[in-house]
Amino acid sequence: MFFPIRDVNPTRSFPFVSYLLLIANVVVFIWVALTAAHHADPVRAAEMLTRQYGLVPSRVSHHLSVAWPTIFTSMFMHGGIAHIVSNMVFLHVFSDNVEDALGHVRFFFFYLLCGVCAAAAQVLVDPSSVIPMVGASGAIAGVVGAYLVLYPRAPIVTFNSVFFLWFVMGMFPVVPAWLIAGEFFLVNLLQGLGSLGIQMQGGVAFFAHLGGFAAGLLLVRVWATTKPQGRRWQGFRQNYPGSAARRDRW
């Protein structure tokens, strides 16, 4: 219902690791597209690259010593424009403040660790699956979980996808971070439980999202180097950037 556009939560340092991760994802996406385009059958070529560099649960569960690199390569591959755009928006919105709290080097390894936990969750749920899993969603879910712990009441500017609520909250309401994180968790939990026992031909790796999210929730306090401070949510229609409203810090 609420798609995050940006947060109103300044940082003390430049989030260069977050930007490098974003650039790396975009570069890999372009590389895959250009590589596939040079083949006679671009669709088949893209599928071959996905199977080569994506995480295949059955391959990891039976041949981990050979397949372990795909745990990391899969984090930088995406299945289409909508997939990478939505992931990069979430990364851009939530990662800078988490990087600020953890420090640059710690954040980089924290991000990768959340991605590993996400992959492990998906493999444990369906170890015999031959469907490749790609995308930064699991690692980014960990960043969202970490943001929830560190900045639960930070203001997030969102797009309200429910038309009749525009008259109540507006088209771009500002909501607290816990609402976005809670919606993310609940949607993935319900859809993940609903997918159990169904022979999937492809789709969203819900349990990877849940695994990454849980990792971010549980690990961020151990990894954080500073006490987080940020702005508090003041209401749906607050104009935070130029508002004279009180800007409390915690």
Image (spheres, rainbow, N blue to C red):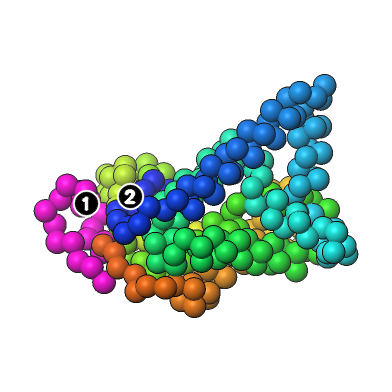
**Figure quadrant of residue 211:** bottom right
| Residue that appears at 52% across and 47% down | 20
- Image quadrant containing the C terminus: bottom left
Q: Residues within 10 Å of mark 2 (few under 14, many from 20)?
A: many
Q: Position of residue 40 (x, y in %)?
A: 82, 21
Q: Nearer the viewer, residue 74 or 224?
A: 224
| Residue that appears at 57% across and 39% down | 26
Asked if disc 2 and disc 1 are in contact, CB closer than 8 Å, the reply is yes
**Figure quadrant of residue 192:** bottom right
Return the mark for residue 240: 1
From this viewpoint, which residue is outermost toward the right?
A: 62
Is residue 238 found inside the magenta-colored segment of the image?
yes
Q: Position of residue 65 (x, y in %)?
A: 85, 64
Residue 149 falls left or right of residue 204: left
Q: Position of residue 90 (x, y in %)?
A: 47, 50
Amino acid type indicated by mark 1: Tyr
Amino acid type indicated by mark 2: Val
The stretch of residues the image draws in magenta is 232-250
Compared to residue 9, the image places residue 102 above or below, namely: below
Q: Is residue 27 visible?
A: yes
Which one is earlier in the sequence, the residue at label 2 or at label 1? 2
Compared to residue 230, the image places residue 240 above or below, namely: above
**Figure quadrant of residue 9:** bottom left
Q: Nearer the viewer, residue 44 or 162?
A: 44
Is residue 127 found inside the magenta-colored segment of the image?
no
Return the mark for residue 75: none
Q: Is residue 186 visible?
A: no
Local SS, label 2: strand
Local SS, label 1: loop
Q: Which residue is mark 2?
A: 157
